[in-house]
Image: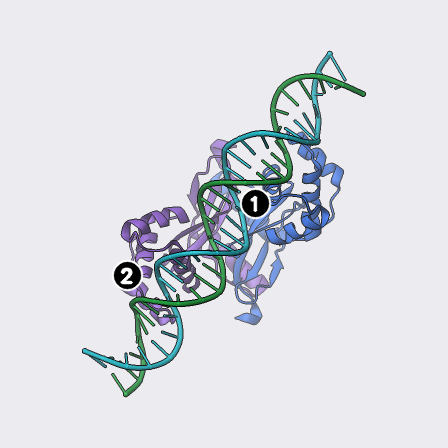
Chain colours: A blue, B purple, C green, D cyan
DNA sequence: TGCCTTCCTGCAAGTTTTCGCATTAAGGAT
DNA sequence: ATCCTTAATGCGAAAACTTGCAGGAAGGCA
């Protein structure tokens, strides 16, 4: 979950966005909030780092980070969750009943994506898929 | 998009929910709104059917329908979209650039899901997946 | 360093979605 | 058909999220 902050901020800058103290704080908060963090968790961490930082700025910063690919947004049970973009995309199985999550083997998903890419002439660009199901113990 | 209303309402009842005129109107509106309908489209159709129907009732009805499986909710670009549950689940490829959507061949996805099911002892229960990518003409 | 342009932020207002509570009505039982 | 229990609705308020705008700061350039 930690991030090389300089590198990330350079990417921001390279994408034509300004590097501000607020954006740095939001990015730190996303890191601190861990994986699959819903907005309220991020807001909580932000307010620790800088209580004067306005919530609308947090929403706008997240939109910028998702736009530039620094942060990945996924949907978990109808809720948006955020996390720092890893070098490797990763995907999950989530149990509808108990909510537990399993991280999928990369080979399985990438062969599926490759198949889609060749069948449909699509360049698949999916960082973080959550597939619903029912786990063994809940079945 | 049409639905056998009686059948659907029986299912509601069987699940322990009451069948009300408001819920019938919301279900009709979901049908009328077509596939991948965002909430505002559903609200629009609802208000045509019954202008006095409160928006909070629409939200609550949709939650009940999703809960009972009468309606499928999916995420499209961070927005919730709804549609009447078909007998067959179906999945899409969506182009990040132009927004066009392709419906995936069922065989491709089901073999992927079967593989996941056997590898992880999960019962996959996914009605409506949207996979992002970039289509041929936008690449 | 200091200026200048333009983007970003905070604030306040607006919109969307959720929630609590009193009233109404569904549907089972008599 | 009527009563009774309790879930569902509508309303108002609150929470969550977005947007417009004026002031402030980032960062390019001299």
Query: Within the image, what quadrant is residue B9 found in?
Result: bottom left
Q: Which mark is residue A69?
A: none
- Please tell me whether residue B14 is drawn above or below residue B71 in the rendered image: below
Give me the residue at 32% from left, 63% from top. B8
Residue A38 visible here: no
In the image, residue B79 lies at what x, y percent? Answer: 48, 47
Question: How far separated are the C-alphas under marks 2 and 1?
Answer: 37 Å
Give me the residue at 34% from left, 53% from top. B30
Label 2 close to label 1 by CB (< 8 Å):
no
Chain of the residue displaying label 2: B
Q: SS class of the residue under badge 1?
A: loop
Please state which of residues B121 and B68 is positioned toward the viewer in this rendering. Answer: B68
In the image, residue C4 lies at what x, y percent? Answer: 66, 17
Q: Mark 1 points at which residue?
A: A126
Q: Is residue A3 left or right of residue B42?
A: right
Q: Name the residue under label 2.
A: B5
- Please tell me whether residue B50 is drawn above or below residue A15 in the rendered image: below
> Around disc 2, counting alpha carbons within 10 Å, would you say few (fewer than 14), some (14 to 19), or many (20 or more)?
few
Q: Do callouts 2 and 1 point to residues on the same chain?
A: no
Q: Is residue B18 left or right of residue A129?
A: left
Q: How many marks?
A: 2
Give me the residue at 58% from left, 47% from top. A73
> Around disc 1, counting alpha carbons within 10 Å, would you say few (fewer than 14), some (14 to 19), or many (20 or more)?
some
């Amino acid at each position: 979950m930690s991030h090389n902050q300089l590198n990330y901020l350079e990417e921001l800058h390279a994408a034509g966005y300004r590097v501000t103290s607020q954006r740095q704080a939001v990015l730190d908060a996303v890191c601190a909030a861990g994986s699959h963090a819903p907005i309220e968790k991020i807001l909580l961490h932000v307010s620790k780092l800088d209580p004067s930082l306005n919530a609308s700025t947090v929403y706008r910063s997240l939109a910028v980070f998702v736009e530039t690919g620094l942060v990945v947004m996924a949907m978990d049970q109808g809720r948006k969750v955020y996390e720092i973009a890893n070098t490797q995309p990763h995907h999950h199985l989530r149990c509808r009943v108990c909510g537990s999550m399993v991280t999928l083997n990369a080979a399985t998903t990438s062969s599926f994506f490759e198949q889609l890419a060749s069948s449909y002439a699509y360049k698949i660009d999916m960082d973080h898929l959550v597939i619903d199901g029912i786990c063994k113990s809940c079945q």
